[in-house]
Amino acid sequence: MTSLRSYQIFAIGMLLALLAALFLPNRVSDRGRSHVQILFAPVAVPTRWVTGLVHGAVWPSRSTDDASPAAPRAAEEVYRENDQLRVELANVARQLEHYKSRAAEREALGQISERCSRYRVMGGDSGPRDALSLLAGGSLEPGMVALTRDGIIGRVDRAGVGGAQVRLLSDKASKFTGSFGRYEPNSAGVAEFRRFDLPATLVQGIGEGRMRSGLLDMKLVEAAGLKENDWLILDDTAWPEALRWFRVGRVATVRPSGQNMLVAEIIIHPAVDAKQLRDVMVMDK
């Protein structure tokens, strides 16, 4: 039989609990509760599990058609909508990649991009020339420079109401002056571009996506160490000053000329394969 003292202890405990609940700050009670709440786990965990089973059996969760809550659609219609959404998502993802690429190209061009507009490439020249046809709508003029973030590709040769034609630097009628150089680490170990101690030289297109330099002294070329994959850059005062030192191509071969062994014959490939371009930037401002 329970003694009177036990009742008194129980009553005092309940009174202390009531006072603690009413007057003890939460920051104090929470600190103590974090140490003793594990004692209730043997009861709380099974109870919560059983409650979840009962709730799921009595009130099972049902998926709702948020697009038509009043009249849920058939499963076949939902499947068709899912397929359509997948196609649209794929299209949006490709468009995002496209615009990211354009933004990266403008960033690579720097301030020059503000003077350029983008034009769609219709295709290459149907004849023997190295050229591109652009959808321009009469906004271009002969002499304007066409380029990409990888380098200069040519100049507008003809322009009309329906479009324009860009003469590529590798075309046989294309001539310009260029210099050679390469990226090398400086004293601090940072890669920087260095022009070779060679005079600017005339470069001419020879067709089939190639250019040729054939006026430099072979001994000077060998002393400079010019070799495959070195850069050819624009060094021509007849072109816009903002494009000076822009990349034009890469050295493919360096060898003595077949006509004069004292002269170097340097074959250069363009910086970009124009046949693969879908659009180009034209410096039209």
Image (spheres, rainbow, N blue to C red):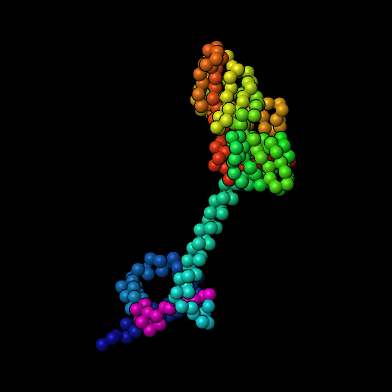
Establish if 278 lies above or below 248.
below
* Percent coordinates x, y for residue 283 in the rendering: 69, 39
**120 to the left or right of 74:** right
Residue in view at x 59 percent, y 40 percent: 126
Viewer-nearest residue: 178 or 11: 178
Q: Which quarter of the figure is the C terminus placed in? A: top right
- Magenta stretch, residue numbers: 52-67
Residue at x 60% of width, y 17% of height: 215
Spot occupied by residue 145 in the image (x, y as percentages of width and height): 68, 36
Quadrant of the drawing holding the N terminus: bottom left
User: Is 74 located above or below residue 30 in the figure?
Assistant: below
- Farthest residue to the front: give it: 127
Q: Quadrant of residue 151?
A: top right
Tell which of 81 and 9 is nearer to you: 81
Choose between 186 and 36: the one closer to the eye.
186
Q: Position of residue 249 (x, y in %)?
A: 57, 30
| Residue ID at (48%, 74%) | 77
Q: Residue 20: in sight, yes or no?
A: no
Position of residue 2 measured from the top left corner of the image (x, y, whole percent) = 28, 86
Decide which of 140, 206 is in the foreground and name it: 206
Outermost residue on the bottom side: it is 1
Inspect this view and state whether residue 132 appears: yes
Q: Residue at x 37, y 77 (%)?
A: 52
Residue 77 is a magenta residue: no
Q: Is residue 63 magenta?
A: yes
Tell me how many marks there are. Answer: 0
Which image quarter: residue 231? Answer: top right
